[in-house]
Image (cartoon, rainbow, N blue to C red):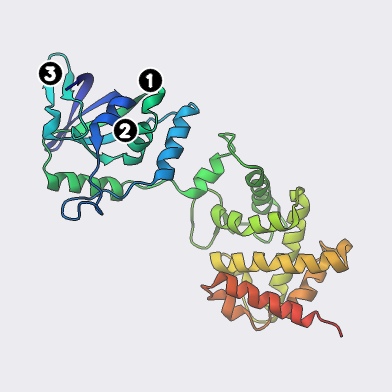
Amino acid sequence: MATDTISVTLITQGKHKFYSGTMLIDVVAESCSTNPRSQDPEEGFQRNLDEGRAESIARYIRDGGTIPSSIILSAQSDSALSYSSRNKTITFEICSSAFLILDGQHRVYGFRKLLNEGMKYRVPVIIYSELSPIEEARIFIDINTLQRPVPKELLLDIKRLADRESSDERLLDELFTSFEQFSDSYLLNKLSRIDKQKGKISKVTFYDAMRSILKEFEIEDTEKLYRIMNSYFLAAHDVSSENSFNLGEQITKATLFKILVSHARAIISIISDNNPTLIERVSEHKKYLSRSLPGSFSEISSSKAYTKSVDALDKKLLRRNVTI
């Protein structure tokens, strides 16, 4: 059986000791395994492998991507792991049961897909030794509960810096910035760019809602779209005030915001067909919103059925728009 020796740093944290080093991905792929809970209900704790996710990791590496985060392993008896304090190295047997994966199973699965491609690629590893099964399970729990993921809003915001925005995301960012900064914006001080905040519309919610408008009308001019949607919001505010509903406070509710924006598609379509030159006028949007919104505020403010609520508003609008 083949062995490998790698340079490591011995780290002690409380009662636990582990080694920090790097391994070639072919060694990782050949010497690490999991015990998925579905296959080992008594002692297993890992989730099942996602083929698509592993393939995307392999493709990412092929394309020159970098993986700086450590794969966390627990040395098993089959590894015959030994540590040389003099050389600051560990030596272990390369076999499929040498290490149990505590974190990083999809990365390892992705590495296996690259085994026959001759790729030389090193990744950081953390290796615990002499852990009991209970300690392995506890460390797995700690890794997956104490780490806080980066907010989706922040990831969206830095895509532009990383030059990874799609064309839709670029337009949505321009639109978000307009609503965030323009002094006449109905959403001024109601938006949160990099995280979720109570009483504000997150960037993720804004994108989810406005993406349907982009797709419906294929709008490339975000300044024009800003003027259209801002007029729409102002008109909705007027109608809500006339019906004793405080839209200014309620619009930051994610579901209500999405319902209102989705309903805008029907309003914009009618105005574009009948009076396209009036598409940016508040009064024109108000004319149609006065048909659909009255009597609906209570329902949309507490709605949990987004599609059903939009359909109800659209039907009220179109029913009142029929001329015989």
Residue behind mark 1: 120
N-terminal label among 3 and 2 = 2
- On the image, the x and y values in percent for residue 39 come to 23, 51
**Mark 3, secondary structure of its residue:** strand
Residue 312 placement, left or right of 77: right
Residue behind mark 3: 84
Query: The disc labelled 1 sits on which kind of residue?
Result: Lys
Could you tell me which residue is drawn at 72 percent across and 58 percent down?
216
State the separation of the CA atoms marked 1 and 3: 26 Å
N-terminal label among 2 and 1 = 2
Query: The disc labelled 3 sits on which kind of residue?
Result: Ser
Query: The disc labelled 2 sits on which kind of residue?
Result: Ser
Q: Is residue 31 visible?
A: yes
State the separation of the CA atoms marked 2 and 1: 17 Å
N-terminal label among 1 and 3 = 3
Q: Is residue 65 visible?
A: no
- On the image, the x and y values in percent for residue 4 come to 21, 20
Could you tell me which residue is drawn at 47 percent across and 33 percent down?
59
**Mark 2, secondary structure of its residue:** loop
Residue 273 placement, left or right of 250: right
Q: Quadrant of residue 247?
A: bottom right
Q: Quadrant of residue 248?
A: bottom right
Could you tell me which residue is drawn at 40 percent across and 44 percent down?
51
> 179 above or below 286?
above
**Mark 1, secondary structure of its residue:** loop
- Count of numbered marks: 3
Residue behind mark 2: 70
